[in-house]
């Protein structure tokens, strides 16, 4: 899936958080493209090709190569100054400064669908006036260098000067009654001073970086150092914006998706980052219901894992020895499912005891559980409550009615008026965080259980780690799909399979989050990001006029029913297209905090 197919829609969602800019000093063709690839794997969300001293052919060649790379990663490629090269390589946008094309002419040349970025001068209000010309419609604004930099001979304005420039821009926008464009800071910024930029302007849209990312020595280049720089830089940006815990969640999600995507995104960098050997896809064992088997298997493949769908008790033990996670979906509650579950529970308990006794290094497969229909029948409630109470589940995810039934079975008296009818949740949960904390506390056992509830805003709680997260951005289209909640659980299983490997890795196991908490949150984020990507395709929907013309009645789910299956196809395309950078671009807002002591 290429950004070029829906450029008009996605340019509105462009993420400038970590904006990589090339420079003549770091233009070694042998390593620059791979440095950019490593930056993208580390979280860079936008790339600008800038070569002030280059001839046309090398400039065009680099832009062409980066065009392909950025398309694969799903991030915009911006060309500095050269509108002709931007059009020649079909770049996503153009950036101009004060000595370049007039803004009006630049917009005329590249058209309305491409990104146009403009550098303004803080001490020259006329440059802001030109940028705000109604014929220009800039997509973002950059200012003078904030700190001294070796890539440009300009006077630094400092964080205070940056604040004043942004305030002037905002004032002029208010006077014109137009929306203020996003503002990108540039010039000598690195992970150690980025917080001062956000203290000056909390709503800074992004940070442009040159030497802070690309300054790694070329000799012996592997990409690891560039990736680490990008990761540290973006983490510092996230901390300045949303705090330590939210930054930790984003960082862990990048690491997880990089494990699943890196070999596919860039084989050369992927091999370097995995020390020459690309690991196989993690195997996810699904004991799931018959309604969603096919779509869960497809989602697992598109997320980057290998699915195995079976509830045969006779092969449960053998599969447990090779799988990386187990997704337990109780929608089809048969005797075979219950028998296979009993064996899986026994094996998990035995492995946990062996690990605690030092008899094994710990191939403990995480259990991801979806208590479908809990509360609808006594059998479901008893079976699912017993599983949670056994203390061997890492993640449980259900709707409001299902999670309330679990909590009440353990003695919780709250939950509001919510109840389960079939597999649907009716009513509302008054305090989802408290309810989930009760479930998490009940199922702790020897493992820190993360309890999750899907809804308009998804919530995840880990009582042992005293942490909770909320994922905003409910989408009504997902409610028209059978099994959309089951897909989230399948995605959580994929993320947990990758996170298990990270937890066993000496280089990436350190985190201040409970094990598999990020995977639980990641399933929601990945689902909503893919859904936003599907909706960005602007697929046709049925209007009232079309209903009258085709003779269709006005009954049914509503106007969106005309695109339910086209949306489904777009959603699965999104599962396959999401990269670490594109998931970040499309991610709903994540709030993550600790419970008070």
Image (spheres, rainbow, N blue to C red):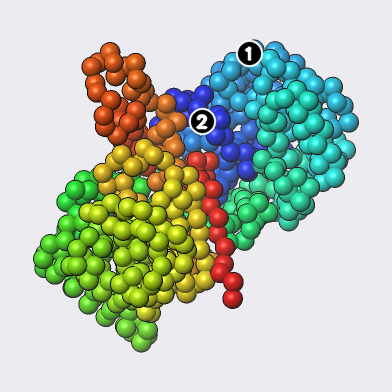
Residue for point 58% across, 18% down: 112
User: Can the viewer see residue 278?
Assistant: no
Residue for point 55% across, 20% down: 113
Compared across the picture, whether 411 is left or right of 332 comes to right
Q: Nearer the viewer, residue 18 or 489?
A: 489
Q: Quadrant of the C terminus?
A: bottom right
Q: Which residue is mark 2?
A: 10
Q: Which residue is mark 1?
A: 109
Compared across the picture, whether 281 is left or right of 538 comes to left
Relative to 252, say whether 156 is above or below: above
Q: Nearer the viewer, residue 184 or 199?
A: 199
Residue for point 25% across, 74% down: 386
Could you say which quadrant of the image residue 459 lies in? bottom left
Relative to 500, say whether 17 is above or below: above
Give the number of callouts: 2
Residue for point 33% across, 70% down: 408
**Local SS, label 2:** helix
Label whose residue precedes the other's in the sequence (2 or 1): 2
Q: Quadrant of the N terminus?
A: top left
Q: Nearer the viewer, residue 235 or 359?
A: 235
Image position, residue 406 (x, y; %): 32, 67
Image position, residue 580 (x, y; %): 49, 46
Q: Nearer the viewer, residue 103 or 419?
A: 419
CA distance for labels 2 and 1: 20 Å
The circle drawn on residue 215 is: none
User: For the view shown, which residue lies furthest in the front direction?
Assistant: 417
Relative to 237, say whether 394 is above or below: below
Disc 1 crowd rating (10 Å Cα; few below 14, some 14-19, many 20+) is: few
User: Can the viewer see residue 46?
Assistant: yes
Image position, residue 139 (x, y; %): 64, 28
**Local SS, label 1:** helix
């Amino acid at each position: 899936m290429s950004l070029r197919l829906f450029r008009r829609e996605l340019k509105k969602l462009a993420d400038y958080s970590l904006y990589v800019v090339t420079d003549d000093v770091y233009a070694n063709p042998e390593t620059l493209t791979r440095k950019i690839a490593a930056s993208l794997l580390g979280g860079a969300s936008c790339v600008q090709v800038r070569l002030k001293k280059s001839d046309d052919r090398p400039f065009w060649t680099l832009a062409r190569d980066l065009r392909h790379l950025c398309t694969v990663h799903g991030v915009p490629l911006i060309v500095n100054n050269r509108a002709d090269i931007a059009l020649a390589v079909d770049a996503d946008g153009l950036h101009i400064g004060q000595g370049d094309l007039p803004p009006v002419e630049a917009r005329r040349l590249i058209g309305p669908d491409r990104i146009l970025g403009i550098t303004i001068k803080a001490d020259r209000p006329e440059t802001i006036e030109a940028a705000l010309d109604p014929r220009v419609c800039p997509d973002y604004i950059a200012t003078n260098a904030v700190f001294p930099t070796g890539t440009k001979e300009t006077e630094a304005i400092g964080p205070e000067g940056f604040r004043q420039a942004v305030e002037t821009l905002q004032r002029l926008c208010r006077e014109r009654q137009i929306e203020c464009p996003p503002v990108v800071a540039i010039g000598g910024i690195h992970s150690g001073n980025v917080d001062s930029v956000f203290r000056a302007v909390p709503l800074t849209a992004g940070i442009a970086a040159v030497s802070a990312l690309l300054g790694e020595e070329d000799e012996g280049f592997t990409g690891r150092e560039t990736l680490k720089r990008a990761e540290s830089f973006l983490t510092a940006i996230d901390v300045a914006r949303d705090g330590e815990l939210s930054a930790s969640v984003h960082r862990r999600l990048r690491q997880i998706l990089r494990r699943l995507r890196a070999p596919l995104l860039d084989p050369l960098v992927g091999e370097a980052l995995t020390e020459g050997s690309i690991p196989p896809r993690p195997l996810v064992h699904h004991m799931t219901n018959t309604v969603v088997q096919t779509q869960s298997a497809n989602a697992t493949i598109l997320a980057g894992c290998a699915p195995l769908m079976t509830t045969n008790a006779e092969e449960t033990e053998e599969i447990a020895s090779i799988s990386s996670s187990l997704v337990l979906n109780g929608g089809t509650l048969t005797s075979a499912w219950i028998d296979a579950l009993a064996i899986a529970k026994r094996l998990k308990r035995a492995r946990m005891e062996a690990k605690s006794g030092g008899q094994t290094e710990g191939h403990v497969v995480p259990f991801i559980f979806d208590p479908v229909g809990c509360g609808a029948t006594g059998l479901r409630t008893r079976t699912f409550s017993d599983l949670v109470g056994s203390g061997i589940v890492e993640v449980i995810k259900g709707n409001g009615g299902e999670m309330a039934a679990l909590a009440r079975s353990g003695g919780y008296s709250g939950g509001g008026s919510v109840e389960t009818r079939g597999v649907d949740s009716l009513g509302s949960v008054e305090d989802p965080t408290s309810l989930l904390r009760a479930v998490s506390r009940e199922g702790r056992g020897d493992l820190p259980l993360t309890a999750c509830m899907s809804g308009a805003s998804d919530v995840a709680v880990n009582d042992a780690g005293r942490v909770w997260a909320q994922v905003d951005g409910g989408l009504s289209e997902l409610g028209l799909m059978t099994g959309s909640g089951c897909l989230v659980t399948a995605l959580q299983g994929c993320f947990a399979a990758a996170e298990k490997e990270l937890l066993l890795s000496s280089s990436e196991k350190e985190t201040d989050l409970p094990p598999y908490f990020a995977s639980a949150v990641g399933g929601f984020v990945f689902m909503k990001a893919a859904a936003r990507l599907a909706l960005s395709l602007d697929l046709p929907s049925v209007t009232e006029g079309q209903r009258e013309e085709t003779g269709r009645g006005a009954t049914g789910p509503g106007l969106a029913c005309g695109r339910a299956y086209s949306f489904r196809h777009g959603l699965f395309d999104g599962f396959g297209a999401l990269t670490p950078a594109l998931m970040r671009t499309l991610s709903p807002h994540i709030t993550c905090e600790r419970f008070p002591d």
